[in-house]
Image (tube, helix red, strand yellow):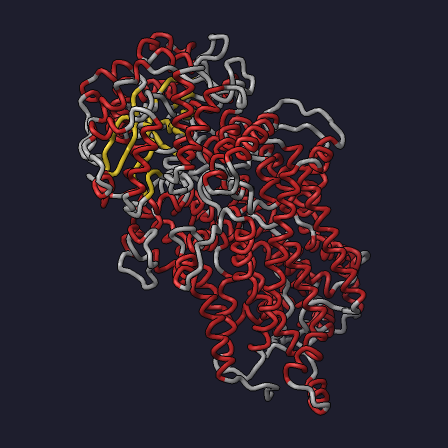
């Protein structure tokens, strides 16, 4: 007699089960196999500028459909996800971007990735700057995890209108002459602040610190928080201390607007023209353009960075072993990292090629950026790229960097004096490295 | 019934202030959502709507990085499935606890009350491992299945069934030859309808709003719930505040709509002894 | 209450002899079907509630890394490390601090609001809806909005403070200020809700108590404190327990309030990092130490149990029998 309601119950259970099965199909990254077109998922963070390249690739390879995930995501969000996908054995894209600071961490488990040397990548060696190529190799040199995408040649982006208001020169060559060294940069900043334009000289001390650190490390020790044998040297590497001290001078001089990098407030400060300079790795130009918006077009320009060159950022593309379409994914990664692919990305969003052929290409060397008052970005960023000296980054580089930059931030905000800040930086870095 | 105390103008003034504080952040959300992105960081801050809402909405849905539409659809699927299931199973169990006699009834009811006190979100680590094993991470079942029936729902239905359904009625139905399932269907379900509506609304809102667990287990940026796509929008390398706020407004809108339509019932449900979901 | 019933009169007495054939089935039904009806909850809770909590303890006894292939048993080591971990204690103090400064004003405001609503008002439902509306908004969305309102330089709150000559407050990097800002968010969401619960309880207070007090010459304010509040004690404590369980697990509000790098830390000096955030930071990104994270979860679990137990004891001593509002008194 209870048949009718029980049947309903069963019906509901079946309906619920069906719903689950249907929704289970929503997962990305591992779509249906078979003879139909292959869908390749590319996992990135920030702006890689690949959209047009995908179109071109799909047109040439009708059997391939490309989906990009993570565009605009910041690295702190992206990298943990990738880690979790690799650990879970599923979920990662067919092609994944790995940032230079995290490369060592991922190389610790090379089994997660396809060895590109087994797939004809060795022939491509000449297409990359030597250090960029080497960074993709495991310690024993037997496995190639990833092919290089971009490098992060550094410049200094500045607001012409604010410089003019402060009575400073505005032409990029003259501005470059203002600051051969970081001390000169500080002196310029003091002049700027004295003019009371209502804006700060720079956005935040944290990004500037990282710039100085990578520059100094590149020019001296060749490593930053970890030495090349993987020991934490945050308190013994003179490059770290020197970058710290310079940054403290900047903070002491009251130049920083203290807009925490990547925060909503930082973006507001871009919108409201609240700072005049920002340390500018090549990929940062795309960030500035997106944040400051069309209204600020032509108000920005790009000068040389104080000190001498340096590299911040840049990535590799890898193919996880869990990919169900490894062969197709490898071909796509090769295409995107080819000289042609790198030029296309540069034109779209500004990441500087790691391929010497691309760097020499007139499309790069002659490139200008209309948003930045027509600045010759190809020469500004590209000039030093070939002579760049790599900075080695150790196993927990990202976690350690977080701690040290947090310490910078506490001093900048006046919560700690430089001495306490340094103690915090060292203590917390050691703690994070041990976790 | 005549009131004990009359409302003075001062009472109304105080209530206007309280209502203003309640509504202002929601209002302001719509203000920013209807202006261009240049309003970001403007001082003095704008407090009246602009004319850009339509443009912001279409930019938001065109923004392929945020997967906002997918988020909306996913949240709708998740919240609806969970709501239907919670109401269904809770009304069955609540009926059993309120009206059926069985061994261990009181002890089991105490267990249910106790489970409401257990902070289950602290189990996220093993739950994450479990979902990995089931291959459910990044997929919606991971956020649906664990909450298909809740102690809160069972308890609420039990409380309501206890006072809304008379034993005589059930007895009469039994005399008529109904088994317990038929009693549930013919007697209990109609009587529980008001409570079921409230439970359904509260469950929908809780599920729609859930953040911690989806944040832990749904890592695929292309397959988020709406709360996760909001997080993605607001944590990116660059932010478009008018888009973020349009997103927050749209994510809040279904809840507001439900509230406007069923506010009276929700208030009744809460005041009739419903505990916090 | 609308109770609809199958209108057919009972045609035959249930004990009629011709019913015997179904009698056994019926007995089976009455005896066992209740278990069938309650089973889904217990099954689900066992798998997704009890098991994870118990397993959390098991994991907390191991050196268990997401990326590691083996996880050796380490006994209580995670706990001893945790007890010596300043960041853990820091997060604990944050959690308790935010809990106290959100719960106390929230309940006082709710009491006051309930008192206002407990008068002969026009548009009664409208007022009730107005104070309840924050409760139905999306938590993450509201946290983003508050994060902007509480901005240091571009936030509306600091702008208004500036109008009255108060210097900008560092809402995100001053520890106490960040507690206040997050508490404001929690209060905003829950005050109206608690007010309605208290209102329901207020309406259940017998009127003659007030009349007696009035005859004794008690003023309205005095009546409020000597009649209303004591009668509401069980409900207030009930609200406190619920606020405890939610408040000690606070996550979404502080997580979304902090934007920029590493929001899971709750600010450069972990100003607003709650215990749940600390658990998350350790168990998931960036450390992936499941063992250590699980230890945090268990200590937090113990803390909640202790605080809830204290609440219950207090409740018992005050003789409150049934928590929650009374029924049938809402109109």
Q: Residue at x 49, y 70 (%)?
A: B18
Can you name the residue that lies furthest to the bottom here?
C215
Camera-side residue: C251 or A63? C251
How many numbered tags mark residues here? 0
Residue B99, quarter of the rendered image: bottom right
- In the rendered image, the quadrant that contains the C terminus of chain B is bottom right
User: Is residue A298 positioned above or below B86 on the image?
Assistant: above
User: Is residue B187 positioned above or below C278 on the image?
Assistant: below
Q: Position of residue A204 (x, y in %)?
A: 39, 38
Camera-side residue: A183 or A154? A183
Q: Position of residue C222 (x, y in %)?
A: 67, 81
Residue C230, quarter of the rendered image: bottom right
Question: Can you see residue B161?
Answer: no
C90 displayed left or right of A105? right
Q: Position of residue A218 (x, y in %)?
A: 40, 17
Question: Can you see residue A137?
Answer: yes
Q: Position of residue C228 (x, y in %)?
A: 68, 77
- In the rendered image, the quadrant that contains the N terminus of chain B is bottom right
Camera-side residue: B250 or A368? A368
B27 displayed left or right of C306? left
């Amino acid at each position: 007699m209870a048949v009718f309601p029980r049947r309903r119950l069963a019906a509901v259970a079946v309906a619920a089960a069906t719903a689950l099965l249907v929704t289970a199909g929503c997962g990305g990254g591992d779509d249906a196999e078979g003879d139909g077109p292959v869908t390749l998922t590319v996992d990135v963070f920030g702006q890689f500028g690949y959209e047009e390249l995908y179109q071109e690739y799909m047109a040439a390879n009708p059997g391939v459909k490309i989906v990009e995930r993570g565009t605009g995501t910041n690295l702190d969000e992206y990298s943990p996800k990738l880690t979790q996908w690799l650990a879970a054995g599923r979920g990662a894209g067919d092609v994944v971007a790995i940032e230079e600071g995290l490369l060592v961490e991922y190389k610790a488990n090379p089994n997660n990735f396809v060895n590109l040397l087994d797939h004809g990548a060795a022939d491509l060696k000449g297409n990359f700057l030597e250090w960029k190529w080497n960074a993709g190799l495991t310690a024993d040199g037997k496995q190639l995890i990833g092919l290089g995408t971009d490098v992060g040649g550094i410049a200094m982006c500045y607001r012409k209108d604010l410089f003019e208001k402060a009575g400073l020169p505005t032409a990029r060559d003259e501005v470059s002459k203002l600051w051969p060294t970081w001390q000169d940069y500080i002196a310029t900043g003091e002049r700027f602040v004295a003019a009371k334009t209502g804006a700060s000289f720079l956005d935040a001390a944290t990004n500037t610190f990282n710039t100085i650190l990578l520059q100094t490390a590149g020019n001296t020790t060749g490593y930053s928080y970890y030495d090349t044998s993987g020991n934490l040297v945050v308190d013994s590497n003179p490059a770290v201390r020197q970058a710290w001290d310079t940054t403290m001078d900047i903070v002491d001089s009251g130049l920083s607007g203290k807009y925490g990098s990547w925060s909503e407030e930082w973006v507001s400060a871009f919108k409201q023209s609240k700072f005049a300079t920002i340390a500018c790795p090549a990929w940062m130009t795309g960030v500035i353009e997106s944040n400051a918006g069309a209204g600020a077009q032509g108000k920005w320009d790009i000068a040389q960075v104080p000190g001498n060159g340096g590299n911040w950022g840049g990535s590799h593309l890898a193919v996880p072993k869990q990919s169900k379409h490894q062969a197709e994914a490898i071909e796509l990664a090769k295409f995107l990292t080819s000289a042609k692919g790198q030029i296309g990305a540069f034109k779209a969003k500004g990441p500087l090629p790691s391929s010497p052929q691309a760097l020499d290409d007139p499309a790069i060397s002659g490139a200008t950026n209309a948003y930045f008052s027509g600045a010759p970005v190809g020469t500004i960023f590209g000039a030093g790229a070939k002579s760049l000296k790599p900075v080695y980054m150790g196993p927990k580089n990202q976690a350690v960097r977080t701690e040290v930059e947090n310490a910078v931030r506490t001093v900048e905000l006046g919560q700690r004096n430089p001495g306490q800040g340094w103690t915090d930086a060292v203590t917390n870095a050691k703690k994070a490295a041990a976790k | 019934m005549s009131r004990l105390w009359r409302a003075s103008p001062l009472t109304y003034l105080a209530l206007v202030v309280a209502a203003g504080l309640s509504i202002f952040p929601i209002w302001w959300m719509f203000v920013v959502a209807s202006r261009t992105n240049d309003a970001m960081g403007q001082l003095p801050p704008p407090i009246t709507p602009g004319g850009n809402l339509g443009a912001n909405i279409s930019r938001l849905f065109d923004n392929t990085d945020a997967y906002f539409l997918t988020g909306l659809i996913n949240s709708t699927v998740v919240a609806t499935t969970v709501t239907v299931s919670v109401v269904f199973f809770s009304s069955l169990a609540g009926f059993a606890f309120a009206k059926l006699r069985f061994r261990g009834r009181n002890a089991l009811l105490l267990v249910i009350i106790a489970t409401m006190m257990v902070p289950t979100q602290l189990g996220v680590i093993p739950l994450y491992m479990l979902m990995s094993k089931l291959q459910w991470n990044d997929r919606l079942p991971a956020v649906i299945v664990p909450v298909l029936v809740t102690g809160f729902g069972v308890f609420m239905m039990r409380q309501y069934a206890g006072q809304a359904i008379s034993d005589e009625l059930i007895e009469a139905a039994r005399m008529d030859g109904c088994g317990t399932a038929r009693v549930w269907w013919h007697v209990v379900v109609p009587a529980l309808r008001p409570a079921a509506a409230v439970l359904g609304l509260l469950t929908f809102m809780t599920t729609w709003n859930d953040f911690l667990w989806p944040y832990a287990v749904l890592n695929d940026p292309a397959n988020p719930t709406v709360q996760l796509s909001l997080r993605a929008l607001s944590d990116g390398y660059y932010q478009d505040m008018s888009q973020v706020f349009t997103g927050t407004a749209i994510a809040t809108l279904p809840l507001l709509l439900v509230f406007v339509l069923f506010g009276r019932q929700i208030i009744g449900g809460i005041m009739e002894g419903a505990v916090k979901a | 209450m609308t109770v609809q019933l199958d209108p057919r009169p009972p045609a035959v007495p249930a004990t009629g002899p011709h019913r015997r054939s179904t009698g056994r089935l019926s007995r089976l039904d009455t005896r066992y079907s209740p278990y069938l009806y309650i089973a889904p909850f217990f099954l689900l809770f066992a798998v997704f509630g009890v098991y994870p909590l118990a397993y959390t303890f098991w994991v907390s006894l191991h050196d268990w890394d997401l990326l590691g292939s083996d996880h050796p048993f380490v006994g209580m080591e995670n706990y001893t490390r945790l007890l010596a971990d300043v960041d853990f204690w820091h997060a604990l103090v944050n959690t308790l601090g935010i809990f106290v400064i959100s719960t106390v004003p929230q309940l006082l405001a709710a009491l006051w609001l309930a008192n206002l609503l407990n008068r002969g008002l026009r548009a009664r439902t409208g007022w009730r809806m107005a104070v309840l509306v924050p409760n139905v908004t999306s938590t993450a969305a509201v946290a983003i909005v508050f994060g902007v309102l509480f901005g240091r330089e571009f936030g509306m709150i600091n702008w208004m403070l500036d109008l009255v000559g108060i210097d900008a407050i560092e809402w995100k990097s001053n520890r106490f200020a960040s507690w206040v800002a997050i508490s404001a968010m929690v209060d905003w969401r829950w005050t109206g809700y608690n007010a309605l619960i208290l209102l329901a309880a207020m309406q259940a207070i017998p009127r003659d108590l007030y009349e007696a007090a009035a005859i004794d010459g008690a003023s309205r304010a005095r009546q409020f404190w000597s009649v209303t509040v004591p009668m509401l004690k069980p409900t207030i404590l009930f609200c406190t327990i619920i606020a405890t369980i939610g408040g000690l697990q606070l996550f979404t509000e502080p997580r979304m309030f902090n934007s920029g790098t590493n929001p899971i830390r709750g600010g450069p000096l972990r100003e607003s990092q709650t215990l749940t955030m600390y658990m998350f930071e350790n168990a998931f990104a960036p450390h992936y130490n499941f063992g250590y994270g699980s230890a945090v979860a268990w200590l937090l679990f113990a803390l909640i149990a202790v605080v809830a137990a204290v609440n219950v004891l207090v409740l018992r001593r005050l003789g409150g029998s049934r928590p929650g509002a009374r029924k049938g008194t809402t109109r």
